[in-house]
């Protein structure tokens, strides 16, 4: 059935490639490319409301916010947060290295990969 709405959507982008100070020329996996993916899903009425994550991934632990978001790191972070809020997504930056995947699971307020796991586990799926 092609008219079935999904329970959720996870938009993923390359956090390092999305740094405004690093112009690589390619925009296929950047934060700014998510607008097209989001609008396409909305047009098809396919994006559910149970889980909406927007995840910027790295394969290494960033040394500082500027590495991910450029010299105006706070301004870029705010821009991304506002984009997500306007469209109903939770914004997460996740280090997918082995170290990044293993930390934070015991924290009360989870971040990164641990938050992704928590969000998926905490969702009551319609198929359950």
Image (cartoon, rainbow, N blue to C red):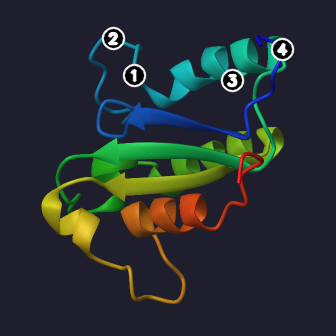
Of the image marks 3 and 2, the number of the one nearer the N terminus? 2
Of the image marks 4 and 3, the number of the one nearer the N terminus? 4
Q: Nearer the viewer, mark 2 or mark 1?
A: 1
Residue 126 screen position, x and y as percent = 78, 47
The residue that mark 2 highlights is 26
**In 3D space, how far apart are the residues under numbered discs 1 and 4 (Cα atoms)?**
27 Å
Whether label 2 touches label 1, CB < 8 Å = yes
The residue that mark 1 highlights is 29
Please, is residue 17 above or below residue 52 in the view?
A: above
Label 1 crowd (10 A; few <14 / some 14-19 / many >=20) = some
Total marks in image: 4
Residue at left offset 48%, top offset 45%: 55
Q: Nearer the viewer, mark 1 or mark 4?
A: 4
Residue at left offset 56%, top offset 58%: 120
Q: Is residue 84 left or right of residue 69?
A: right
**In 3D space, how far apart are the residues under numbered discs 3 and 2 (Cα atoms)?**
19 Å
Of the image marks 4 and 2, the number of the one nearer the N terminus? 4
Label 2 crowd (10 A; few <14 / some 14-19 / many >=20) = few
The residue that mark 3 highlights is 38
The residue that mark 4 highlights is 3
**In 3D space, how far apart are the residues under numbered discs 2 and 1 (Cα atoms)?**
8 Å
Please, is residue 50 above or below residue 27 in the view?
A: below
Residue 57 screen position, x and y as percent = 35, 44
Whether label 4 touches label 3, CB < 8 Å = no
């Amino acid at each position: 059935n092609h008219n079935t709405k999904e329970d959720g959507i996870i938009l993923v982008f390359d956090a390092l490639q999305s740094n405004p100070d690093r112009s690589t020329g390619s925009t296929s996996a950047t934060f700014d490319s998510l607008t097209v993916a989001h609008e396409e899903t909305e047009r098809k009425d396919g994006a559910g409301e149970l889980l909406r994550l927007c995840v910027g991934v790295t394969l290494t632990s960033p040394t500082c916010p500027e590495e991910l978001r450029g010299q105006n790191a706070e301004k870029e972070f705010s821009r991304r947060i506002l984009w997500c809020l306007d469209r109903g997504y939770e914004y997460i930056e996740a280090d997918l290295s082995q170290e990044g995947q293993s930390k934070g699971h015991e924290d009360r307020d989870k971040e990164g990969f641990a938050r992704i796991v928590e969000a998926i586990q905490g969702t009551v799926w319609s198929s359950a």
